[in-house]
Image: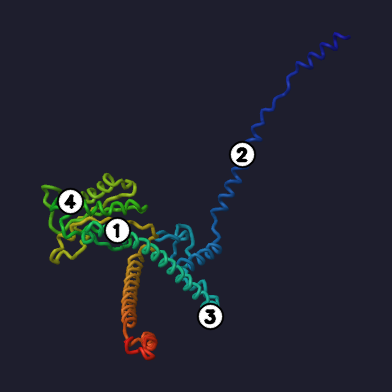
Amino acid sequence: MSSGHGSRRRKHEEHEEHENHERWLVSYADMVTLLMVLFVVMFAMSQVDEKKYAQLKEGLAAGFGSSDSLLEGSSSLHEQPGSAAVDSVSPQLATANLDSEQQQAVANAVQRAAALQNQRSWDEAAAEAERLEKVRATLTSALEREGLAGDVTTSYDHRGLVISLVSRHVVFQANLASLSLRGQQVVDAVAPVLRSLEDPLQIDGHTNQVPVKPKYYATDWDLSAARAVTVLRRLEEQHGLPADRLSVAGYGHTRPLVDPSKPGSQAVNKRVDIVVLTDLAPQDAALLPDAAAKAEADAAEEKARGKARTKAERKAERKARKAGTSPDSPDDSHDSDGAHAAAAPTGPDSKEQR
């Protein structure tokens, strides 16, 4: 009996479990479901709510103008094939439903914002002009100490402070890019001031209207660029200005400083400009020349007032000195009378005392 039960148990244990060959259907069904959900979401995202889009466009148009597109030169999303176009929205449309007082309030707010932005731009330009004016004054002092003040002129443009090596002496020989001795002295005089700055510098080379001889340089573009490189190399190699602050540009004869038809223009237009570049935003940098001119005018006016005060003070001092030594002065006459009264002889010995 026991052997029979043992044989049945062994047969039961040896029976193999049935394997399910259709388990992949579950994973496949899950994948198909996820793909269907993905396509439904993508389809829903492709549908544009024209009403909400029109509201968005009206808001953007009111803030940035009446352009149909968000970027200049691009087309509207509704101009694409298969989309309905939206009428152009004018800036006034955003305030069309407001009463006159509200429209005036909006207009005043826009004007105040524009005025504030303009004032901020002017303040930025004025502060930069004041800083660069100090740099210019330092350069002028350095040149005056070396007796070279007449060899450099300064001006302002949208790039910053322009230092022009315009000498009555020869800075560059005709058709050559090497600095003369005078030119080297000028560069050496301004180099310490430029090295103390952190601003990037651009060295611009220029030629005059006289055609260059191909014997030396092929064109005046080559000559102007070579002159700029000569100054750059002296600033870097002789005075240690960092190379990452320096750049060059050659303009040939296209940017004369003086009208080429005027006498003496050839010597002036043959020059190198060292530009102390500003980091102002373009809209602020455009105001830099006007801000610098105003700062210069204010400085000249203050200097004139100072001279007038000094002259008046000197005149008052001379008048005071003259009044102090005059016998007709009220205080002096009083003291003089007292002195005479004290010195007047009295008594029987008055004759001998006199």
Residues tagged 3 and 2 counted as in contact (Cβ below 8 A): no
Task: Name above or below for residue 330 compared with residue 154.
Answer: below
Instruction: Give the SS element for disc 3.
Output: helix
Label 3 sits on what residue type? Ser
- Point 36% across, 85% down: residue: 332
Which part of the image, by quadrant, shows the C terminus? Answer: bottom left
The residue carrying mark 3 is 100
Q: Which mark is residue 181?
A: 4
Q: Nearer the viewer, mark 2 or mark 4?
A: 4
- Point 17% across, 49% down: residue: 178
The residue carrying mark 2 is 31
Label 2 sits on what residue type? Met
Instruction: Give the SS element for disc 2.
Output: helix
The reply, left or right, for residue 177 in relation to residue 293 is left
The residue carrying mark 1 is 139
Label 1 sits on what residue type? Leu
Of pointers 3 and 1, the one earlier in the residue sequence:
3
Q: Position of residue 142 (x, y in %)?
A: 28, 57
Which part of the image, by quadrant, shows the N terminus? Answer: top right
Q: CA distance from mark 2 to mark 4?
A: 84 Å
Q: Nearer the viewer, mark 3 or mark 4?
A: 4
Q: CA distance from mark 3 to mark 1?
A: 58 Å
Q: Position of residue 271 (x, y in %)?
A: 20, 57
